[in-house]
Image: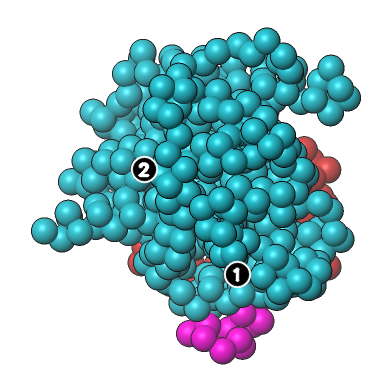
Chain colours: A red, B cyan
């Protein structure tokens, strides 16, 4: 399959159908004489920033570290953990096992305190 | 039966949600300066808007994606970052304009300076979005907006001669003030074909879980709802043409525009105009704020939507709150709301190709709309008009600003 067209930028859901973000980057292994192989997908603004410009990626990374977010970001999902690639990319993990929702959780700490948020 | 009910509801709420700061100010200026001669611009822009909204609804119903999501998947983030940024900037500007318009209307009713009302109005907008679900928000905005039918009542009661009104639907080149005429026609297009309206409409189709069975409802809502809605804007233009034109009043503030109601509504004129403007702007402010959340949530793949518990969509809530706060801050500086409105609607036409062209490409791809693709003639025409509009905007905006 054409990994760039078929995988990159698609929505990612976990095995329970919960949103994990989008495929913000891909890790491709290139070997002589063989077609490139998809090793992993990356989810998170650092990967997205790097696609625009390495400097943007570094900047976003610095902001994330400053905020003390999980160092395990951008989230890397190995090829073997990808279940299906259709309209969305479905992975065998659950979102809770990854740091994909680190920002959401951080903000939930604030938003969840307001009356009427539940 | 339920579908007919939904359809009627969709049409009624589109009518109530149609006019806001942009459409009222451009229609009032066009009517007062050029009589009925710019009616064609509202009509043409409405057909354009309805065609695009129908497509947005179709992608949502068939492809189960918002326009923003589809553009990212098809063209990649590299490309998307440009239209996304442009749309966010116009969203912030237009939101500032709507908050200002709503604040001016409260000023007309209370006599207290408009800047004092910006923050309270912003807070009410936020509370509506915090507490309401999609149905409440959409229908609330739509039904309250029916007060804008006062424009239709005014135009009706003034009984303008039919022939000159009908002639207004045929584009003509005026003998004087060509630049101003071209600028106003561009502004009318920008005020009518707002990107926020398109994305809001398509996101609504996703929030309401439309399917392929709803395609005819989508088509009818888009064309009838926006068609009838545009009649309110046309009525504003006609009223301004009949009342303000002969008195040589050019609309340089909303207070001047309010005078168009005097012959029909007498001492209730200012109150009714203020209510129409205020409710129209407030409704648009709610929708634009929500749209900013939709844009970012859909582009980055967050969980989004006002039908979910707010704590489960924290990034979405934070995003639209920040955008609202930004616009409230800009509006509170005290820029003239009418000026901001006119700048943002003209700018909208300039960025239109960035939003419309990729979208037209998607409408031809089976991966997104299956067999419900758009025809090449319609798409070609929309593409040509978009580019033509943008070129015209790039020419007339500097001429208007620096005096051609």
Say whether residue B259 is magenta: no
**Residue nearer the viewer, B197 or B243:** B243
Residue at screen point 74% across, 18% down:
B177
For residue A25, what is the image quadrant? top right
Residue at screen point 36% across, 14% down:
B376
Q: Earlier in the sequence, mark 2 or mark 1?
A: 1
Question: Label 2, on which residue?
Answer: B228
Question: Label 1, on which residue?
Answer: B125
Q: Is residue B273 visible?
A: yes
* Residue B267 spot, x, y in % from top left: 59, 64
Q: Using a 10 Å C-alpha cutoff, classify the residue at mark 1 as few (fewer than 14 neighbours), some (14 to 19) or many (20 or more).
A: many
* Residue B134 spot, x, y in % from top left: 41, 66
Depicted B325 relative to depicted B76: above or below: below
Say whether residue A115 is magenta: yes
Q: What quarter of the picture does the C terminus of chain B occupy?
A: top right
Residue at screen point 61% across, 88% down:
A113
**Residue nearer the viewer, A15 or B284:** B284
């Amino acid at each position: 399959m054409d990994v760039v067209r078929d995988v990159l930028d698609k929505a990612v859901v976990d095995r329970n159908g919960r949103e994990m973000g989008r495929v913000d980057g891909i890790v491709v292994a290139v070997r002589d004489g063989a077609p490139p192989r998809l090793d992993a997908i990356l989810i998170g603004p650092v990967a997205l920033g790097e696609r625009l410009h390495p400097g943007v990626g570094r900047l976003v990374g610095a902001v994330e570290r400053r905020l003390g977010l999980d160092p395990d970001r951008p989230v890397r999902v190995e090829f073997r953990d990808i279940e299906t690639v259709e309209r969305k990319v479905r992975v065998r993990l659950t979102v809770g096992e990854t740091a994909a929702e680190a920002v959401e959780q951080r903000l939930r700490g604030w938003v969840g305190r307001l009356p009427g948020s539940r | 039966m339920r579908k007919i009910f939904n359809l009627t509801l969709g049409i009624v709420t589109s009518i109530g949600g149609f006019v806001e700061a942009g459409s009222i100010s451009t229609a009032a200026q066009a009517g007062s300066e050029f009589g009925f001669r710019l009616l064609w611009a509202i009509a043409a822009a409405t057909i354009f808007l309805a065609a695009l909204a129908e497509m947005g609804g179709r992608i949502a119903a068939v492809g189960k994606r918002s326009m923003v999501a589809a553009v990212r998947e098809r063209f990649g983030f590299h490309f998307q970052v440009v239209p996304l940024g442009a749309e966010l900037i116009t969203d912030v500007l237009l939101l500032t304009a709507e908050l200002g318009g709503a604040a001016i209307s409260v000023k007309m009713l209370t006599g207290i300076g408009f800047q004092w009302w910006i923050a309270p109005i912003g807070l009410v907008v936020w509370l509506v979005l915090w507490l309401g679900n999609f149905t409440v928000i959409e229908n609330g905005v739509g039904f309250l907006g029916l007060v804008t039918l006062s424009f239709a009542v005014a135009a009706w009661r003034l009984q303008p001669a039919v022939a000159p009104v009908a002639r207004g639907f045929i584009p003509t080149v005026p003998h004087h003030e060509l630049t101003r005429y071209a600028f106003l026609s561009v502004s009318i297009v920008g005020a009518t074909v707002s990107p926020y309206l398109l994305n809001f409409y398509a996101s609504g189709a996703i929030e309401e879980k439309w399917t392929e069975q709803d395609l005819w409802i989508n088509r009818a809502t888009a064309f009838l709802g926006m068609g009838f809605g545009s009649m309110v804007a046309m009525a504003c233009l006609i009223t301004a043409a009949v009342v303000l034109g002969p008195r040589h009043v050019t609309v340089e503030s909303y207070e001047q525009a309010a005078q168009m109601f005097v012959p029909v509504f007498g001492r209730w004129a200012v109150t009714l105009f203020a209510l129409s403007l205020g409710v129209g702007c407030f409704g648009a402010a709610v929708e634009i704020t929500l749209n900013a959340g939709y844009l970012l949530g859909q582009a980055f793949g967050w969980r989004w939507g006002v039908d979910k518990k707010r704590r489960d969509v924290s990034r979405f809530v934070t995003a639209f709150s920040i955008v609202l706060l930004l616009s409230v801050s800009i509006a509170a500086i005290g820029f003239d709301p009418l000026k901001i409105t006119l700048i943002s609607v003209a700018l909208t036409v300039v960025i239109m190709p960035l939003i419309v062209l990729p979208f037209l490409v998607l409408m031809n791809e089976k991966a997104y709309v299956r067999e419900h693709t758009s025809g090449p003639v319609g798409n070609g025409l929309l593409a040509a008009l978009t580019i033509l509009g943008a070129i015209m905007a790039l020419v007339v905006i500097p001429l208007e600003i620096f005096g051609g």
